[in-house]
Image: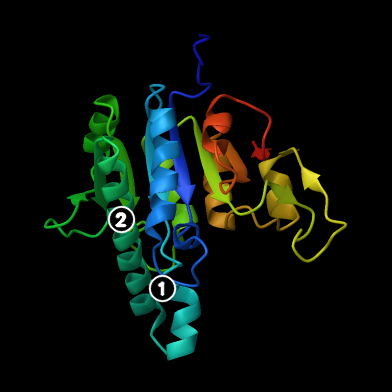
């Protein structure tokens, strides 16, 4: 049997909250959590150090809900951060049921359910082959979980950010709406900013550009794609 050698030692996987809802319109789908956990276990068993930033859009979207309910934007953003904690705990449970040691680290202190985020402690967990799930964004309103992913990846010195989406890369237009949209195989950070391509928000892209941190955008819904990405197969769109 040929031993599969990963191309990356340490990755940060960015999961949207919507990904965890599966086919449901809202909430957390248990089967979807188990499916993602099994894919993460596959790369963990290969020796890859895995950190995850999870969103909360399946439960509460700060920006949208602040307008809908007339909430103060800061309050709405904090509510969104708490939604990411629920998702993180659900994913942790799914991983640990598969025998993968996992730690949830939060930017907002809540010691009864998660560890406070400390860079050195996070690095130690990774070195001890524990999967880390970062929740509560950056701990500050007005910043997205994309920015949290770029920040945490830079802090833990990840080799790459892998942004899991519902499409197989970055396109010239929304492929769901425009059949003529063409997929990019490679992009430069500056092109993403200049063309306003919806890879991540501009703050996150700028941070990745400043730290020479590549981003791979790929389709999470195709089973085995996380492993393919880690093995360096040509999937998705690489931004560097």
Is residue 154 something one can see in this rendering? no
In the rendered image, residue 94, in percent from the top left (x then y), is placed at: 31, 47
Decide which of 220, 212 is in the foreground and name it. Answer: 220
Residue pointed to by mark 2: 90
In the rendered image, residue 62, in percent from the top left (x then y), is placed at: 43, 74
| Helix, strand or loop at mark 1 | loop
Decide which of 233, 67 is in the foreground and name it. Answer: 233
| Helix, strand or loop at mark 2 | helix
Dividing the picture into quadrants, the one containing residue 96 is top left
Is residue 12 something one can see in this rendering? yes
Residue displayed at 38% across by 72% down: 77
In the rendered image, residue 31, in percent from the top left (x then y), is placed at: 41, 54
In the rendered image, residue 183, in percent from the top left (x then y), is placed at: 78, 46
Dividing the picture into quadrants, the one containing residue 214 is top right
189 left or right of 100?
A: right
In this view, 71 is above or below 153: below
Mark 1 Cα shell of 10 Å, populated few (<14), some (14-19), many (≥20):
many
Quarter of the figure that contains the C terminus: top right
In the displayed orientation, state which residue is furthest to the bottom. 70
Residue displayed at 24% across by 33% down: 125
Residue 60 tag number = 1
């Amino acid at each position: 049997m040929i031993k599969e050698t990963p191309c990356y030692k340490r990755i940060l996987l960015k999961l949207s909250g919507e990904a965890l809802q599966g086919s449901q319109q809202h909430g957390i789908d248990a089967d979807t959590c188990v499916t993602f956990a099994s894919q993460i276990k596959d790369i963990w068993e290969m020796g890859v150090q895995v950190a995850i930033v999870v969103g909360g859009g399946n439960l509460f979207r700060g920006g949208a809900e602040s307008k809908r309910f007339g909430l103060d934007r800061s309050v709405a953003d904090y509510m969104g951060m708490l939604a990411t904690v629920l998702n993180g705990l659900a994913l942790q449970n799914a991983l640990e049921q598969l025998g993968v040691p996992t730690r949830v680290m939060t930017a907002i202190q809540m010691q009864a359910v998660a560890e406070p985020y400390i860079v050195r402690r996070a690095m130690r967990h990774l070195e001890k082959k524990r999967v880390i799930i970062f929740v509560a964004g950056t701990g500050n309103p007005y910043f997205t979980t994309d920015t949290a992913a770029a920040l945490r990846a830079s802090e833990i010195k990840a080799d790459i950010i892998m942004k899991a989406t519902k499409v197989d890369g970055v396109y010239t237009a929304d492929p769901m709406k425009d059949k003529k949209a063409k997929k990019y195989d490679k992009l430069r950070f500056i092109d993403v900013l200049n063309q306003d391509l919806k890879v991540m928000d501009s703050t996150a892209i700028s941070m990745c550009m400043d730290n020479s941190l590549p981003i791979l955008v790929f389709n999470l819904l195709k089973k085995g794609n996380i492993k393919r990405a880690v093995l360096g197969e040509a999937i998705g769109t690489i931004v560097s």
